[in-house]
C-alpha cells in the first residue's frame, strides 16, 4: 500500500518552509513562520508563529496533518501541539551533515525525494571547501550580543570551509547557545582579524563593537573588518546556507567594505 504524503503542512521554521517551496511542495504548505518571506511568485500563506511563540488555536484551525519544528527552542511548542493531537516532525540539526540528512528526510516525507537529492548534490557542490582551508584569517562569529554567543556548529564548519580560522572552534560541539557564551578577555586573547555577526532575528549594530570596553585594540576593530551576514543566509540550517557561504568566501578573499545594517 502506497504511503500517503502529508497534504496540509505547517512550518514553524523558515528553512523547512523554504525547502518545501524549493522542492515543489509549496501547495502542501498551509501555514508558515513569520520569519520566512516567500518568493514573490509563491502563493501567500498564513503566518501563525514566530520562532519561540506560536498561535496554537490558529494552527489547529488550519487542520494540519503535519507540523514541522526546529531546535530545542521549539520543543515546548512541539509538545503542546502533540498534546492537541497534531502530528509533529521535530528536527534539531546542528552540523552540515545533519542539515543534509534533515533536508533529505523532509523531501522524502512529501514524496519529492528525487528533487531533494538533486538539490542536495548542488548544495554539497556549492559548499565545497576552498582549496586552502588551513591557516586563514582568525575569525569571530557572533550569534548574539547580550551575552556574547559564538557561532553554532554549522557556522564554524562553513568558516573553515571558506578558508578562515574560527577562534572558538572548540565550542562547536556545544549544541546549546548558553554553552557558547564567550567573554571579552577571551576575545582579547584570540585577537580576531575579522568579526562577523548575525543576531538571531534583530539587526546588527556594527558600531557597537568598537564601543565595547576593552575591544579597541582587537585587530578586527582597529582595521574595521566587521561585517553583518543576514540571518536567513547563515542562521537558518537549510539550503540557503549556500548564500551565506558565498558571502563568507567573498569577505575572506577580498575584504569587503563594512556593511551597513539593513
Image (tube, helix red, strand yellow):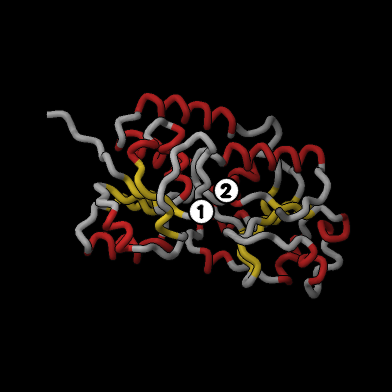
1 and 2 marks in contact (CB < 8 Å): yes
Chain-order first, disc 1 or disc 2: 1
Name the spot of residue 106 as percent of width and height, x first: 36, 39
- Disc nearest the viewer among 1 and 2: 1
In the image, taking residue 252 as reference, residue 127 lies left or right, namely left
Report whether residue 135 is seen.
yes
Q: What residue do we see at 78% from left, 50% from top? A: 259
The residue most toward the bottom is 213
The residue positioned 58% from the left and 34% from the top of the image is: 127
Q: Residue 82 lies in what quarter of the image?
A: bottom left
User: Compared with residue 114, is residue 94 higher up or lower down, i.e. above or below?
Assistant: below
CA neighbours of label 1 inside 10 A, class few (<14), some (14 to 19), many (20+): some
In the rendered structure, find residue 232 and report the number of the disc placed on it.
2
Q: Residue at x 62, y 38 (%)?
A: 243
Residue 199 spot, x, y in % from top left: 62, 60
Can residue 188 be seen? no
Name above or below for residue 72 compared with residue 107: below
Split into 4 quadrants, where in the image is the N terminus? top left
101 lies left or right of 145: left
For the point 64% across and 43% down, the residue is 160
Name the one closer to the observer, 213 or 39: 39
In x, y percent, where is residue 262? Answer: 71, 53
Residue 4: x %, y % from top left: 20, 35
Q: CA separation, marks 1 and 2?
A: 9 Å
Q: Mark 1 points at which residue?
A: 35
The kind of secondary structure element at disc 1 is: loop
- Using the image, tell me which numbered label, if any, was put on residue 9: none
> Which quadrant of the structure image shows residue 192?
bottom right
Amino acid at each position: 500500500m502506497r504511503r500517503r504524503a502529508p497534504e496540509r503542512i505547517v512550518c514553524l521554521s523558515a528553512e523547512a518552509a523554504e525547502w518545501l517551496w524549493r522542492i515543489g511542495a509549496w501547495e502542501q504548505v498551509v501555514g508558515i513562520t513569520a520569519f520566512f518571506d516567500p518568493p514573490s511568485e509563491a502563493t501567500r500563506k498564513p503566518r501563525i508563529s514566530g520562532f519561540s511563540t506560536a498561535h496554537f488555536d490558529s494552527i489547529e484551525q488550519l487542520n494540519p496533518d503535519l507540523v514541522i519544528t526546529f531546535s530545542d527552542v521549539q520543543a515546548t511548542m512541539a509538545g503542546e501541539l502533540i498534546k492537541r493531537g497534531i502530528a509533529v516532525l521535530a528536527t534539531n540539526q546542528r552540523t552540515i551533515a545533519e542539515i543534509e540528512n534533515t533536508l533529505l528526510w523532509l523531501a522524502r516525507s512529501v514524496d519529492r525525494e528525487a528533487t531533494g537529492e538533486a538539490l542536495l548534490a548542488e548544495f554539497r557542490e556549492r559548499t565545497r571547501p576552498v582549496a586552502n582551508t588551513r591557516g586563514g584569517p582568525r575569525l569571530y562569529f557572533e550569534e548574539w550580543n547580550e551575552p556574547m554567543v559564538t557561532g553554532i556548529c554549522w557556522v564554524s564548519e562553513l568558516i573553515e570551509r571558506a578558508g578562515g580560522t574560527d577562534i572558538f572552534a572548540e565550542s562547536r560541539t556545544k549544541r546549546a547557545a548558553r554553552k557558547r557564551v564567550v567573554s571579552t578577555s577571551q576575545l582579547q586573547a584570540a585577537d580576531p582579524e575579522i568579526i562577523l555577526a548575525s543576531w538571531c532575528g534583530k539587526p546588527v549594530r556594527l558600531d557597537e563593537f568598537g564601543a565595547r570596553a576593552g575591544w579597541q585594540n582587537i585587530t578586527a576593530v582597529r582595521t574595521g573588518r566587521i561585517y553583518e551576514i543576514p540571518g536567513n543566509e547563515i542562521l537558518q540550517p537549510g539550503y540557503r546556507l549556500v548564500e551565506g557561504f558565498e558571502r563568507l568566501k567573498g569577505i575572506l578573499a577580498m575584504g569587503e567594505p563594512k556593511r551597513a545594517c539593513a
